[in-house]
Image: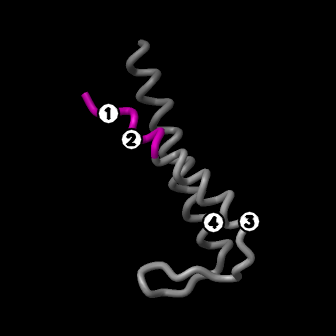
Amino acid sequence: MRSNTWNLVWTLIGAVIIMMTFVNTSDSKIVFGIEIDIWVYSGLWGLITVASFVSYLKRKKEEAG
């Protein structure tokens, strides 16, 4: 059985990163040597966060049922 804890960890990390993008005043972020807009960066982490949380919920439901 796969560990459901990692999905929750990625969800929490993503939520913290998204919150920190609103606190910091920078207009861009460098990811893998490429400068991207802060909204794109937040959007990517938002997708990761939502996907991890949905996966967490699905696995939790499978364990219960």
Q: Earlier in the sequence, mark 1 or mark 4?
A: 1
Query: Please, what secondary structure does the residue beneath circle 2 have?
Result: helix
Crowd around label 2: few <14 · some 14–19 · many ≥20 (10 Å)? few
Whole-percent x, y for residue 60 in the image:
45, 24
Q: Quadrant of the N terminus?
A: top left
Q: For residue 3, which numbered disc appears in the image?
A: 1
Q: For residue 23, which numbered disc appears in the image?
A: 3
Hey, what amino acid is under mark 4? Answer: Ser
Whole-angstrom CA distance, mark 1 to mark 3, is 32 Å
Left or right: 52 with respect to 42?
A: left
The reply to whether the C-beta atoms of the residues labelled 2 and 4 are less than 8 Å apart is no
* Residues drawn in magenta: 1-9
Query: Please, what secondary structure does the residue beneath circle 3 have?
Result: helix
Q: Earlier in the sequence, mark 1 or mark 3?
A: 1
Whole-angstrom CA distance, mark 2 to mark 3, is 26 Å
* Up/down of 17 relative to 32, above or below: above
- Residue nearer the viewer, 60 or 33: 33
The reply to whether the C-beta atoms of the residues labelled 2 and 1 are less than 8 Å apart is yes
Crowd around label 4: few <14 · some 14–19 · many ≥20 (10 Å)? many
Q: Earlier in the sequence, mark 2 or mark 4?
A: 2
Whole-angstrom CA distance, mark 2 to mark 4, is 20 Å
Q: For residue 42, which numbered disc appears in the image?
A: 4
Whole-angstrom CA distance, mark 1 to mark 4, is 26 Å
Q: For residue 32, which numbered disc appears in the image?
A: none
The quadrant holding residue 29 is bottom right
Q: Where is mark 2, residue-wise?
A: 6
Whole-angstrom CA distance, mark 2 to mark 1, is 6 Å
Whole-percent x, y for residue 5 in the image:
40, 35
